[in-house]
Image (cartoon, rainbow, N blue to C red):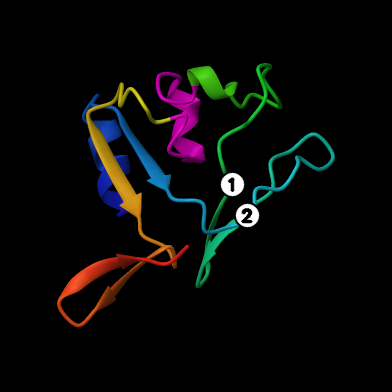
Amino acid sequence: MEDLLRAKEAQHLTARITAGFCWRWGEPRRGRLVDDITIGSWRKPWNLRGESRLDGVPPSWLWATDPVGFGQVGCVYTAQGFEYDWNGAILGDDLVWRQDRWLPNP
């Protein structure tokens, strides 16, 4: 999914990855975001929560429009306006398939 979205970015389209709150959202350490979202060997940080840049990472309100925002996974709150062309959604343990339908798993 990330490769497909990177290809869209290379075509001068905008793309982001979003997820539900299935992973902890750690505080930055030593001035850097923490890779809280881990699926196998794939790891990414959540978008920055603060209103100031951190080591080149855009503040939460610019995550969807700043090109550097592609390096983080957005939460449902920072992705509200969907100001980008392509979105990849990670379905975590909060939404599960049971027999014939999706069910919430709070």
Check disc 1 and report the residue beneath it: 45
The image shows residue 32, relative to residue 63, as above or below, that is below
Q: How far from the left and from the top, in percent, is residue 17?
A: 38, 43
The furthest residue to the bottom = 99
Q: Quadrant of residue 54?
A: top right
Q: Which mark is residue 36?
A: 2
Q: Nearer the viewer, residue 73 or 7?
A: 73
The kind of residue tagged 1 is: Pro
The kind of residue tagged 2 is: Asp
The furthest residue to the left = 100
Residue at screen point 63% across, 30% down: 49
Q: Nearer the viewer, residue 2 or 28?
A: 28
Residue at screen point 28% across, 40% down: 87
Residue 90: say if magenta: no
Q: Is residue 105 left or right of residue 98?
A: right
Residue at screen point 44% across, 68% down: 93
